[in-house]
C-alpha cells in the first residue's frame, strides 16, 4: 500500500493544479477528469492499438528469448567460446538498437519487419548477457558433482544450467521487455500506422492534448502491468528458492 502513496500524491497534485485551481494551461495540461473521461470514451480504439503493439512486441520478444537463452547457456558454460566472442559482445551489446533503424528500413520490406528487428535486438542482448552471467554464477561444486555423476548432455542444460541461471535470466527478460516496449513506442511514433505510439503521435499532430495525455497514461499502465506479470511469473517459476 505504501508503494502507491507517491502515485496518489501525484494524482492529487495533478487534480489540484488543473481541475481545481487551473494553474496550468488547460490546453497543454488537461486535468485528470478530462483524461479519464477520454480513456473511457476511446477505450475500444486504445484496446485495438494495444493489440497491435503487443502483437509486434511479443513476436519480437519471443524470438529474442528463444535464441538468447540457448546461446547464453552455451557461451556461459564454455570459457573457450566466451573468450572467442567476448570482443564482439563488448562491441555490439552497448550499441543502442535504434541506430539500426536506417538499415532496417532500407533492407526489410515492411515497417512491421523493420520494427521487429529493432525490438529483437533490444531484447536479445539483456537476455543473452544475463544468461551468460547466470551460468557463471552457478556453484562450481554443483557442476562438478553433475560431471562426476555422468549426467547426460540434455539434462546438463535442462536440469543444471537452466534452473541455476534462471534468476539472472528473469532479470534480463524484465530489462529486455521494458526496453523493447520503449523501442516499440518510438518506432510507432516515427513511422507507424497503428499502435499506442501512433495513437499519441496522431493526436499530437492535431493538438488534441487530452488524448495525448490519455495515451501516455495508458502506455504507463500497460508497462506497469507487463512488469507486474513478469514479476509474478518469476516468483512462480522460482518458488523453489523460497523452499
Image: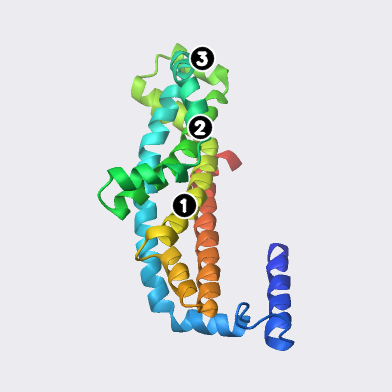
Picture residue at 47% right of the left edge, 36% below the top: 125
Picture residue at 62% right of the left edge, 80% below the top: 32
Residue lying at the far bottom in this picture: please name it. 20
Residue closest to the eye, 28 or 79? 28
Numbered tag placed on residue 129 in the rendering: 2
Can you identify the residue that label 3 sits on? 144
- Helix, strand or loop at mark 3: helix
Question: Mark 1 or 3, which is nearer the eye?
Answer: 1
> Which part of the image, by quadrant, shows the C terminus?
top right
Does residue 243 appear in this view? no
Residue closest to the eye, 205 or 210? 205
Residue closest to the eye, 191 or 5? 191
| Rendering quarter of residue 34 | bottom right
Mark 3, residues whose alpha carbon is within 10 Å: few (<14), some, or many (≥20)?
Answer: few
Q: CA distance from mark 2 to mark 3?
A: 23 Å
For this view, does 242 lie left or right of residue 206? right
Q: CA distance from mark 1 to mark 3?
A: 42 Å
Image coordinates of residue 19 in percent, x first then y, are 68, 86
Q: CA distance from mark 2 to mark 1?
A: 19 Å
Can you identify the residue that label 1 sits on? 183
- Helix, strand or loop at mark 2: helix
Amino acid at each position: 500500500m505504501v508503494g502507491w502513496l507517491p502515485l496518489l500524491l501525484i494524482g492529487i497534485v495533478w487534480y489540484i493544479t488543473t481541475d481545481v485551481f487551473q494553474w496550468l494551461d488547460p490546453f497543454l495540461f488537461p486535468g485528470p477528469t478530462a483524461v479519464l473521461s477520454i480513456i473511457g470514451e476511446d477505450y475500444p480504439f486504445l484496446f485495438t492499438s494495444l493489440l497491435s503493439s503487443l502483437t509486434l512486441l511479443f513476436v519480437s520478444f519471443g524470438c529474442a528469448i528463444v535464441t538468447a537463452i540457448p546461446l547464453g547457456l552455451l557461451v556461459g558454460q564454455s570459457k573457450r567460446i566466451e573468450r572467442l566472442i567476448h570482443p564482439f559482445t563488448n562491441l555490439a551489446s552497448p550499441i543502442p538498437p535504434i541506430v539500426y533503424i536506417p538499415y532496417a528500413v532500407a533492407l526489410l520490406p515492411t515497417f512491421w519487419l523493420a520494427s521487429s528487428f529493432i525490438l529483437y535486438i533490444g531484447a536479445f542482448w539483456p537476455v543473452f548477457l544475463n544468461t551468460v552471467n547466470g551460468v557463471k554464477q552457478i556453484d562450481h561444486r554443483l557442476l562438478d558433482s553433475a560431471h562426476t555423476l555422468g549426467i547426460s548432455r540434455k539434462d546438463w542444460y535442462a536440469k543444471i544450467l537452466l534452473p541455476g541461471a534462471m534468476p539472472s535470466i528473469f532479470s534480463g527478460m524484465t530489462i529486455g521487455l521494458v526496453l523493447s516496449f520503449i523501442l516499440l513506442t518510438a518506432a510507432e511514433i516515427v513511422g507507424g500506422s497503428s499502435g499506442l505510439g501512433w495513437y499519441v503521435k496522431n493526436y499530437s499532430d492535431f493538438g488534441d492534448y487530452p488524448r495525448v495525455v490519455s495515451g501516455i497514461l495508458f502506455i504507463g499502465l500497460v508497462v506497469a502491468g507487463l512488469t507486474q506479470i513478469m514479476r509474478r511469473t518469476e516468483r512462480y517459476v522460482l518458488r523453489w528458492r523460497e523452499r
